[in-house]
């Protein structure tokens, strides 16, 4: 090899070592950067046909475990769905409580039954009658609080849907734009790795919202498909449309047109409805919360409130009622069996027995419809109210067993909420462990700072060796010049 060839080879070696050191530096600096793919330099020999041999940088490889990334994204979507539902039942469970919780419905029903026993023992005492009315007011307060939480959760889910749809549209558009930029970079023989990092980060950001599958294409482009095969990003990005609703009441549903559904616009290929396309992630969970889970909870609350009103409004319980409402009312009126949706939010104490509404607690003893106080020792109506709470009302109540006491119905509701909460938390925990498992697998091809430091030592030695060759060639050329 000539001196010129040796000098050329050593110079190419310095260039390759410098580029390698740059990549190691980038790897170490981004060891904790989300979405960063480890860079590995690709070298090839110039060979005998080159200018005296040497080395050339033929490219930079972005090293990632695409399978692990895909599985981690699907696991993230499962976690997003499970976690949203777990949060819902955690919130509701806090309000509903357990039978040993003094603020639970069971505890309030027990307090009301005990106050009726005390009033029956001392029917002439205004204090015991007032205490019974106060206990009844506590049951009403529970229904109002629980119903408010359910509707607030629906409103929160609706708002989250709006925010997630906005993020989804922004990211899908950005991913489509990055596809174009990456293709241009590759066509120009430039390194597209930073753009690919950003694209991966954007996909990861929405993978918990909607389960996505990444399909590679030519020139570094990708397509994004949902689990049912709907294309969200291909030659262009699809768009989701949704209109938020600020205030939601129990009567409002998608079917009635009062709440917005989800629309998919511009998809190159779609399978089924927009809701079917997003099935499996946090976005689908929020729709399920708004349109299914909370509605089911509201229906159970309404059934309990209806049951309570019905069993205490019968003429056999209080002969003075006539056609009027009993001690519990639907906003002061008798219950309308055709209008029970949202009754848990409307249930009230009859103003006739409530001193806070201008009524008199002695009417709890003598009858809601009584116009004057009767014998102070009369306990027949008090006993009938207590008996009504322990038995099913005449004609029963929708979704309620015919022989169930109201206390057992309340306990059954609490048990249902508690059971579903435990189940949803178990699913969320399992999904979280899946995310952690695939993240760990994905990280095995990530940046290992120890390995990078070992590479740096080799690069340093290579750089020094090539520099030494250049120095030797220079000395030999100087010797020739001195002859």
Image (cartoon, rainbow, N blue to C red):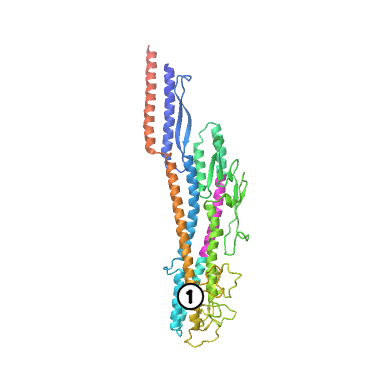
Based on the picture, tell me whether residue 431 belongs to the magenta stretch: no
Q: Quadrant of the C terminus?
A: top left
Q: Residue drawn at (49%, 88%), measured in percent from left and top? A: 375
Task: Tell me if mark 1 has few (under 14), some (14-19) or many (20+) residues whose alpha carbon lies within 10 angstroms of its own.
Answer: some
Q: Position of residue 143 (x, y in %)?
A: 51, 69
Residue 318 in the image, given as x and y percentages of width and height? 54, 81
Q: Residue furthest top?
A: 483
Question: Does 165 lie within the magenta span?
Answer: yes
Closest to the observer: 423 or 58? 423
Q: Which residues are magenta?
A: 148-172
Residue 34, image x, y percentages: 46, 43
Against 482, residue 314 (above or below) is: below
Q: Position of residue 425 (x, y in %)?
A: 45, 56
Quarter-of-image position of residue 114: bottom left
Q: Is residue 66 something one can see in this rendering?
A: yes
In this view, the residue farthest toward the bottom is 375
Q: Nearer the viewer, residue 127 or 399?
A: 399
Above or below for 463 versus 333: above
Vertical comparison of 232 with 394: above or below: above
């Amino acid at each position: 090899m000539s001196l010129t060839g040796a000098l050329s080879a050593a110079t190419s070696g310095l260039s390759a070592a410098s580029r390698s050191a740059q990549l190691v530096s980038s790897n170490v600096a981004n060891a904790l950067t989300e979405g960063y793919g480890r860079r590995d330099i690709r070298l090839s020999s110039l060979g005998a046909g080159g200018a005296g041999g040497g080395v050339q940088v033929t490219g930079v490889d972005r090293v990632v475990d695409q399978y692990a990334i895909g599985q981690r994204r699907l696991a993230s979507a499962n976690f997003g769905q499970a976690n949203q539902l777990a949060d819902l039942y955690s919130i509701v469970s806090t309000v509903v409580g357990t039978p040993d919780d003094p603020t639970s419905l069971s505890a309030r029903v027990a307090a009301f039954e005990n106050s009726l026993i005390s009033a029956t023992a001392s029917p002439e005492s205004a204090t015991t009658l007032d205490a019974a009315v106060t206990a009844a007011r506590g049951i009403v307060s529970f229904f109002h609080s629980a119903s408010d939480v359910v509707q607030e959760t629906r409103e929160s889910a609706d708002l989250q849907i709006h925010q997630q749809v906005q993020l989804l549209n922004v990211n899908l558009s950005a991913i489509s734009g990055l596809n174009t930029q990456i293709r241009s970079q590759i066509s120009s023989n430039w390194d597209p790795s930073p753009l690919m990092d950003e694209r991966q980060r954007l996909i990861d950001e929405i993978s918990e919202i909607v389960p996505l599958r990444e399909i590679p294409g030519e020139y570094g482009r990708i397509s994004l498909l949902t689990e049912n095969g709907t294309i969200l990003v291909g030659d262009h990005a699809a768009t989701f449309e949704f209109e938020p609703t600020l205030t939601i009441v129990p009567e409002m549903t998608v079917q009635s047109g009062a709440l917005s559904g989800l629309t998919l616009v511009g998809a190159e290929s779609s399978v089924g409805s927009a809701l079917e396309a997003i099935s499996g992630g946090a976005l689908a969970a929020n729709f399920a919360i708004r349109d299914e889970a909370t509605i089911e909870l509201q229906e159970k609350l309404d059934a309990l409130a209806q049951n309570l009103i019905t069993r205490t409004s019968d003429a056999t319980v209080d002969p003075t009622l006539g056609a009027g409402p009993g001690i519990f009312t639907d906003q002061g009126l008798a219950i309308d069996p055709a209008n029970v949706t949202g009754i848990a939010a409307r249930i009230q104490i009859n103003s006739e027995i409530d001193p806070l509404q201008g009524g008199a607690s002695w009417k709890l003893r003598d009858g809601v419809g009584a116009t004057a106080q009767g014998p102070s020792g009369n306990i027949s109506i008090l006993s009938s109210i207590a008996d009504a709470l322990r038995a099913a009302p005449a004609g029963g109540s929708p979704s309620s067993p015919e022989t169930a006491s109201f206390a057992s119905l309340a306990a059954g509701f609490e048990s249902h909420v508690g059971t579903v909460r435990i189940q949803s938390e178990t699913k969320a925990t399992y999904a979280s462990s899946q995310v952690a498992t695939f993240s760990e697998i994905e990280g095995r091809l990530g940046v290992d700072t120890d390995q990078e430091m070992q590479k740096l030592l080799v690069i340093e030695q290579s750089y020094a060796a090539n520099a030494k060759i250049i120095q030797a060639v220079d000395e030999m050329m100087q010797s020739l010049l001195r002859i």
